[in-house]
Amino acid sequence: MSKIIISCAITGSIHTPSMSPYLPVTAEEIAASAIGAAEAGAAILHLHARDPANGRPSAAPEHWMGFLPRIRAATDAVINMTTGGSAVMTLEQRLAAPLMAAPEMCSLNMGSMNFALYPMLGKDRVWKHDWEEPFLRNSDDLVFKNTPRDIEGVLRLMGAERGARFEFECYDVSHLYMLAHFRDRGLVAGRVFLQFVMGVLGGIAADPAHLIHLKETADRLFGADYAFSVLAAGRSQMALAAMSAGMGGHVRVGLEDNLYIAKGELAVSNAQQVAKVRGIVEALGRSIATPAEARAMLGLKGAAAVGF
């Protein structure tokens, strides 16, 4: 099997500051956490921005620019900017910073879906900020909008016009068929990089049988012209990462996807999760890819061609 790419999702837009004191919020925290993850073995850093005043997910370019240059100066890891942002943002908001920064890589959500976060209210906690509880509670009426028109626009603006390659985020089997549709229309070319996103309520569950089904479906649709990675939200994170590694896939970890390192024990950093998954995949006989190797595997344009 080829070398395995470890991606690390540093902060995301799902978890709120009250859930963990280790969730990076400020530009300094995001940069330091991303650099630590790269030093631990992450070849790709999947990034979101937050408002440093209150930890709320942010699309503001100035918040992004607080950490992007710092990360690029300190590591050669691939910087992967989200175009998903937060499910409560408009597409225009979500694209503001990526359009400016022209990164090597972007995430692209492959379909609209319910995005239900309210089950996280089940644990008693003291809220640090007044936006957190309503944000989670109101997700029982939240649709994450990613229509075919939206997807086509991102492919054009970020791919055709700015040269980014994509982490195609597939939250369900139907999203693979949507990607195949755009491939058949000629809007997606070359070897695709699939991210199977499992365990978000509204998408496919983090179940081993579902991972097998996703892989078999991708085999039928894309043949040899794809690579896949797996992220499992919550407690299934490491188990499905190990399964992906054993199937020849890549892995994603990080505090965006799971705040814990073991049952009942908060992860103290993204680097801690990267180190754990690195130990798992190396024990399975896989060697981790360097950033340069990841760039070659994914056909990226290189860090010299970004806009920050």
Image: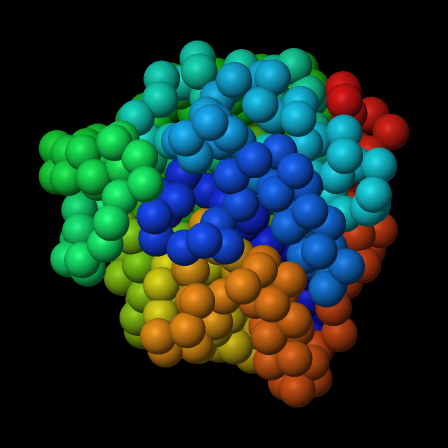
- Give whichever of 299, 59 is nearer the camera: 59
**For this view, does 126 lie left or right of residue 140?**
right
Q: Quadrant of residue 258?
A: bottom left
Q: Is residue 222 visible?
A: no
The residue depicted at 43 percent of the width and 34 percent of the height is 55
Across and down, in percent, residue 159 comes to 63, 24
The residue depicted at 23 percent of the width and 54 percent of the height is 125
Across and down, in percent, residue 272 comes to 60, 67
Q: Quadrant of residue 147?
A: top left
Q: Is residue 183 above or below residue 155?
A: below
**For this view, does 106 lie left or right of residue 179?**
right
**For this view, does 170 lie left or right of residue 114?**
right
Q: Is residue 12 visible?
A: yes
The residue depicted at 67 percent of the width and 57 percent of the height is 37
User: Where is the C terminus found, in terms of image quarters?
Assistant: top right
User: Where is the N terminus found, in terms of image quarters?
Assistant: bottom right
Q: Is residue 276 above or below residue 269?
A: below
Across and down, in percent, residue 173 comes to 32, 52
Structure colour scheme: rainbow
Across and down, in percent, residue 287 comes to 75, 74
- Give whichever of 294, 212 is nearer the camera: 294
The residue depicted at 32 percent of the width and 31 percent of the height is 87
Q: Quadrant of residue 79?
A: top right
